[in-house]
Amino acid sequence: MNEAETRAEHIDPALKAAGWGVIEGSRIRREYSITLGRIEGHGKRGKALTADYVLEYRNTKLAVIEAKAWNKLLTEGVGQAKDYAGKLAVRFTYATNGQGIYGIDMHTGVEGELAQYPTPEELWSRTFAVLNRVRDRFAAVPYPDKGGSWAIRFYQEIAVNRVLEAITEGGDRILLTLATGTGKTSIAFQIAWKLFQTRWNLSDGPFDRLRMIGEPTRRPRILFLADRNTLADQAYNDFSSFAAFSEDALVRIDPADIRKKGKVPKNGSIFFTIFQTFMSGPGSNTVRPELVEGFHNNGLRQAQPERSFYFGEYPPDFFDFIVIDECHRGGANDEGNWRGILNHFTPAVQLGLTATPKRKDNVDTYAYFGEPVFAYSLKGGINDGFLTPFRVRQISTTLDEYIYTADDCVMEGEVEYGKLYKEADFNKIIEIKEREKKRVEIFMSQIDQRQKTLVFCATQEHALAMRDLINQMTTSSNPNYCQRVTANDGALGEQYLRDFQDNEKTIPTILTTSKKLSTGVDARNIRNIVLMRPVTNMIEFKQIIGRGTRLYDGKDYFTIYDFVKAHHHFCDPEWDGEPVEPETCPKCGGYPCLCEKPLPQPCLVCNQRPCECEQEPCPKCGRHPCGCKKKAKVTLADGKERSIQYMTVTSFWHPDGTPMSAQQFMESLFGKLPEFFKNEAELRDLWSLPDTRAKLLFGLAEQGFGKEQLLEMQKIIDAENSDLFDVLAHVAYALPPLSREQRAARAKVEIHAHFNSKQQAFLDFVLAHYVKVGVEELDREKLTPLLRIKYHGAIADAVADLGRPEEIGKVFAGFQKYLYQHPK
C-alpha cells in the first residue's frame, strides 16, 4: 500500500473519527505549502517544504502530521514532522504510517505512541492551557485573503500571532524584526484587522487584558506612523487593496487638509501619517507649561516640554494601537526629535516594525521596545524562496582616489595640495566630472539598459549629475529614461517613483537618489543596484540590498554594482549573524546609558531648546550657513580621462554573508551540472570534436542545461565573449575564462604549423566567424555555409583549393582541438 492509499484508507478516517473536518471550526489542510523553495533560475526552485497535513481549529494552526506508506516504519517521518512543526511554530506534531500514531510535544520534549488523534478541543486546550477571552476572540477572526488572490505566509502568520499574544499578555511595547521585502505592511494589516473585527480597545471597562471582562463597545483607533510619505502612502494603499475596511474607516492625515479644516481628523478607525506632519503645528512657538512624561522601558521617566504640535491636538489615549514603520529611524531613538510623539501617546500599545537586527546603531530601538517577539532574517527569506538572491560586481578604477597635480585645472573652489582625496570626499568637498562620467560608462556598458535600476549617489546634487550623464549615454530615445528622486524633487519626484514602481511601465527605467530611496520602496522588478557613494552603516547597507530582494516573475537574481567597496560589509559578522551586546555604561550598567540627564536650559532670548534665534550671516559672503568655502571642482588634464582604467570582479555571496564559488552560485540557480565528463581533460576532448560536442550539448539540454541556460551562465560569470567551453570549465573546475579572440590567437600558431597556406586561409576565415558569433560556427552543419561565403558560392573552387569534401571535413574538424588544448 503506497502513501496515497495509506492516507485515504487509514489516516483520513482516523482524523475524521477524532472530529477533524467534522467539528465546526476544525479544518484539515492537506499538502500544506510552507516554503516555496530557493529560487534556482529559469522558473525552477529548490525543494519546497510541504506538510502532508496541518490541523487547524478556530483559524489557528495546532499540529502537523507527516504521513508515510503502510510498509514504512512508524517513526520514519519523525524528523520531517519536527522540522515542519518548528517552521510553523506549532506545539504538537505527529508521524504515522497508518498503522499507528507517534506524537511529539515540541515544548516539553515528550514523545511516544498514541492510541488516537486528539480532538480539536483537546488539542486547543493542550496548546492554550490558560483561559484567555481576548485570544479566543482574536482566533475567531479569519485572515482576509483578497478574494483568494493572496495567502498569508507561514512566518507572517507567526508574526501576527506573536504580536496578538503579547497584547493579550499586557504588552504595550512590541517589536517585530523582518527582512526588507518580507511583507511587514501586510502583517500590520492582519493585526489591525483582527483588532478591528474584535472591537479590541483600551478604554472599555471594566477591562482586564488577560480576560476582557465585559463586551467591547467600540472599534479601536489605530495609527500607522512612518517617517516618509512614500511609506505612509504605500501602507494606506496596501490596506485599501484588501477591500476589507469601509472607505470611511481609513484616514490619511494630511497637513494641507488640517490647515483647510482648522483641526486634525478624528472620525475614522485607522489613521496614516508621518512624523513630520505630527510635528507640524499652527505656528505657535510657545512652550506649553505642562510637562509630558517621557517613557522608558525600565520604568525611568523624564519630563519633557511639549510644543504646540498637531499630535498634541489628540488626547494621549486617543489611539489604542500605534504601528511605527521603520522604527529604528527617529521615533524610538532616544535622541530623535520625534520621540515626543510616542511619549505623548504612552497609553497606546505601540508596535515597532524594523528590518534591522539589534546593532550599536539602533540599540535605542531595542531599549524602547524590548527584544523582538519574532524575527525573520534575509538569510531565511532567500533560502525559503520568499526573497531573491544576488551577486556583486566589484568595480575599481585608477581614479578611486586622487591627489591634485598642477596640470589639472581647478574650475571652482580650492584644493588641498598633497591631500589624498578618498571616496568619502568625492562629490562633497571635491568633484571630478570625468571620474563620474567614467563610472557611468562602466555600469551602463554592463547592465541590460532595459532593466530597472537604482543608483545611490553621495548628495542630491550628485544624483542630478548622474541623472544627466545616464541620459546622455543611454541607448534609449525616451527623455524620461532616467530621473532623480530626492527630497528636493517634491511631487514630481514622487510621481516618477510611482511610475518606476509600476511593473506595467518601463519609463523611468533608472532612478538616481541619495538617501530617499534607501528604504521603503516597494519596486519588485529592480534588477540592478549601483552604489556610487560609501555606505558606512550596516543598517542602511542591509536596507539598500533590500531594494532588490523582492520577488518578481522571471527575476532569478539581482546585481549590485559596487564602486565603493561596500561589499566588505558582507564579510562583517554583523551581516546576518547574531547580534553582539555593546558595552554598557559603567555608571548605570545600561546601553544606551539610562542615567538621568538634566535638560539643557532654554535660550534666554527665544525660550526654546535648542535655540531657534535667527543666526547672524557670515560677514564675508552674507550667507547662513557660510558659503565661502565652495566644493572644489576639478577638470583633469588633457588625456587623463582616456587613461582611466578599471577592473571588474564578480563575486557571489551566501545570504549569511559568506562567499560562495561560481559553481555554488550556478548550482543554487540552475542545479548541479550533470556528470557527462569525469575531469577537465575529458571535457577538452569532448569539446574538441564537432560530433562529440554536439552529443554533450544534447545531453546537457535533456538535463535542463540547454543553450538558453548556458548563455545565462555565461553572462553571470562575465564571459559573454568567451566560448561555452569556458562556462563549463569555470563552473566545474574554476578555470579562468578565455575570450574567443584569445583562443583563436593561440590556435593560429598551431594551424600555421600543421596546415598548408590555402587551408590556413580558410581556417583563419572560420576563426573570424567563431570570434564574432561563437562556438556554433564550428558545428559540422556550418561547414557548407562557411565554404559558400568564403568562395562566393563556388564550391568547386573550394574543392580545388582544399581537396575532396571528406578531406575538407577532416581539416574543419581536426583544427578545433587546437582551440581547446591545454596551454603548453
Image: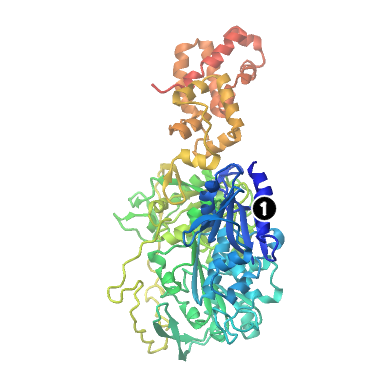
Q: How is the image coloured?
A: rainbow
Q: 172 left or right of 404? A: right
Q: x, y percentage for residue 551?
A: 59, 53
Visible residue check, residue 588: yes
Q: Nearer the viewer, residue 21 or 156?
A: 21
Q: Nearer the viewer, residue 679 or 468?
A: 679
Disc 1 residue type (three-letter)? Asp
Q: x, y percentage for residue 815?
A: 51, 16
Q: Report how many numbered discs are placed on residues in the image.
A: 1
- 332, above or below 480, in the image: below
Visible residue check, residue 557: no
Q: Nearer the viewer, residue 430 or 249?
A: 249
- 595, above or below 726, in the image: below
Q: x, y percentage for residue 32?
A: 62, 53
Pick the quarter of the image with the C terminus: top left
- 53, above or below 72, in the image: below
- 321, above or below 353, in the image: below
Q: Residue furthest left?
A: 586
Q: Residue at x 51, y 39 (%)?
A: 667
Q: Place residue 411 in its image quadrant.
A: bottom left
Pick the quarter of the image with the N terminus: top right
Q: x, y percentage for residue 800?
A: 61, 7
Q: Residue at x 49, y 25 (%)?
A: 683
Q: Residue furthest front?
A: 115
Q: Secondary structure at mark 1?
A: helix
Q: 196 left or right of 666? A: right
Please tell me how crowded label 1 is: few (under 14), some (14-19), or many (20+) other residues with Cα within 10 Å: some
In the rendered image, which residue does mark 1 sit on? 12
